[in-house]
Amino acid sequence: MKKWRCTVCEYVYDPKQGEEGVAEPGTPFEKLPDDYECPECGVGKELFEEIDE
């Protein structure tokens, strides 16, 4: 699964880890709620970009 980075604050969503209170481990970014916000700066999903590692 690909990781996604916030283009504002550089927070990285790692689907292998999920996000406490939002998504269980193994949840791909595309399956996050439409109103998902970056836990660091509060911007929406549209300001995240897929990253290769």
Image (tube, grey):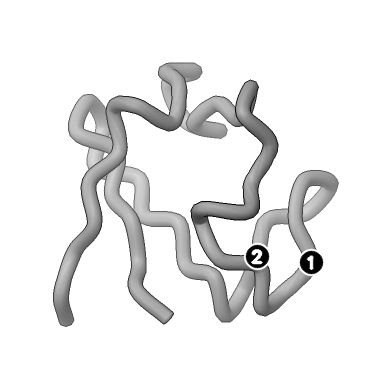
**Residue pointed to by mark 2:** 18
Q: Which comes sooner in the sequence, label 2 or label 1?
A: 2
Residue 18 in percent (x, y) is at: 65, 65
Residue 37 versus residue 32: which sits nearer the camera?
32
Q: Does residue 26 lie above or below 10 as drawn?
A: below
The three-letter amino acid code for the residue at tag 2 is: Gly
Q: Which mark is residue 42?
A: none
Q: Residue at x 79, y 66 (%)?
A: 24
Q: Which residue is drawn at 26% across and 31% down?
A: 9
Q: Which residue lies furthest to the right in this view?
A: 21
Q: Does residue 6 lie above or below 51 as drawn?
A: above
Q: Which mark is residue 24?
A: 1
Image check: 46 left or right of 34?
left
Q: Which residue is drawn at 34% across and 27% down?
A: 46
- Callout 2–callout 1 Cβ contact below 8 Å: yes
Mark 1 residue element = loop
Q: Residues within 10 Å of mark 1 (few under 14, many from 20)?
A: some
Q: Does residue 14 lie above or below 20 as drawn?
A: below
Image check: 12 left or right of 28?
left
Image check: 3 left or right of 32?
left
Q: For the C terminus, give its image quadrant.
A: bottom left
Q: Does residue 3 lie above or below 23 as drawn?
A: below
Residue 8 in percent (x, y) is at: 22, 25
Q: In which quarter of the image is residue 12?
A: bottom left
Residue 15 in percent (x, y) is at: 54, 70
Cα gap from disc 2 to disc 1, whole angstroms: 5 Å
